[in-house]
Image: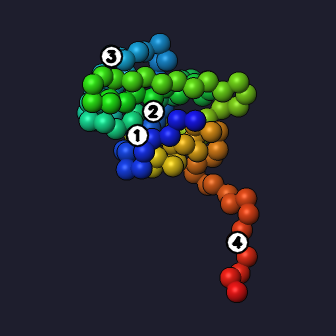
Amino acid sequence: MFGPPPGTRVFLACGVTDMCKGFDGLAAQVQTVLVQDPYGGALFCFRGRRGDLPKILVWDGQGLILLAKRLERGKFVWPQAASGVVSLTPAMLSMLLEGIDWRMPAWTVRPETAV
């Protein structure tokens, strides 16, 4: 599974994005709507209306990379805000892409007392 390296800045575009947009359309949205630099090395995540297909735009130093992931069942957990941007950690993005609710992750096993 794709996971950005630690320290990578990750931004989620709140609301719905037209998933027909490609490199240039999403880079323009990063500049105008999110007021960020699409060529700064940060990851920018966008979500379509159905919520089962996010697109990730990132500059790797030589060109833009556009990634997409489609869930066969279920939806990705996304902020409820109609517009704006939310900053995540790389670990939160990894959970989001796995279909885990990154807002309230639950421990599967609690550690026992140390003796």
Q: Which-is-in-front pick, marks 2 and 4?
A: 4
Disc 4 element: loop
Most foreground residue, 43 or 17: 43
**Which quarter of the figure has residue 12?**
top left
The residue located at (63%, 46%) in the rendering is 101
Q: Which residue is mark 4?
A: 111
Q: Which-is-in-front pick, marks 1 and 4?
A: 4
Mark found first going from the N terminus, 1 or 2 = 1
Q: Amino acid at mark 2?
A: Cys
Mark found first going from the N terminus, 4 or 3 = 3
* CA distance separating discs 1 and 2: 6 Å
Q: Amino acid at mark 4?
A: Pro
CB atoms at circles 1 and 4 under 8 Å apart?
no
CB atoms at circles 2 and 3 under 8 Å apart?
no
Spot occupied by residue 115 in the image (x, y as percentages of width and height): 70, 86
Is 104 on the left-hand or right-hand side of 34? right
Task: Look at the picture and state if 22 lies above or below 2.
Answer: above
**Which quarter of the figure has residue 109?**
bottom right
The numbered disc on residue 84 is: none
The residue located at (66%, 27%) in the rendering is 71
Q: Which residue is mark 2?
A: 45
Q: Which colour scheme appears in the figure?
A: rainbow
The numbered disc on residue 24 is: 3
Is 14 on the left-hand or right-hand side of 70? left
CB atoms at circles 1 and 2 under 8 Å apart?
yes
